Amino acid sequence: MRLILRADVDGVGNKGDVVEVTNGYGRNYLLPRGLAFLATAGAEAQAEGMRRARDVKDAAARAQAEEVAKSLVNSPVNLTARVGADDRLFGSITTADIVAAIATQKGVEIDRKQVHLSEPIKTVGTHLVPVKLHANVEFPVTVEVASDAVG
């Protein structure tokens, strides 16, 4: 079954792509959910317009992501936390903490899902945290965790 995708579908294609899928998958999943429509001659011309619009939007998003990356890659983000024995933190530094620190210190709003922290930071020191703002724009952010001098 030839369909044109109305939205990005994992493992199938992106918005505006003309795809060939099994009849059952198209009839029972893609069409009822409004994720695709049947590919006809006129619809394929419409799909070409969707692909062009997607490419323009993608190029703009990538350029914006590269600008944000340039502003974040060379300047560290500083965080403080209460520290116990062996420079271990009481609690941990999470992606939400990192995103909040970037927003306050750098004035850049990013989604916490774009910060890829394999596990929360639990020690004092310098940590490199990967951030992926776009499919082709991934860079490390330096997070410096210092001891909170309380008492």
Image (spheres, rainbow, N blue to C red):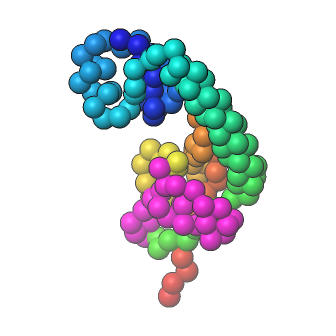
Q: Which residue is more in the foreground, 116 or 109?
A: 109
Relative image position of residue 110 (x, y in whole percent): 57, 56
Relative image position of residue 66 (x, y in whole percent): 72, 44
Q: Which residue is more in the foreground, 79 or 52?
A: 52
Determine the residue positioned at 69% across, 65% down. Answer: 106
Start and end of the magenta stretch? 84-113
Quick one: quadrant of the N terminus? top left
Q: Which residue is more in the foreground, 107 or 7?
A: 7
Determine the residue positioned at 61% across, 34% down. Answer: 54
Residue 151 in view of the camera: yes
- Is residue 97 in the magenta section? yes
Relative image position of residue 78 (x, y in whole percent): 63, 66
Q: Indicate whether 15 appears above or below 26.
A: below
75 left or right of 39 in image: right
Determine the residue positioned at 67% across, 67% down. Answer: 107
Q: Indicate whether 129 appears above or below 50.
A: below
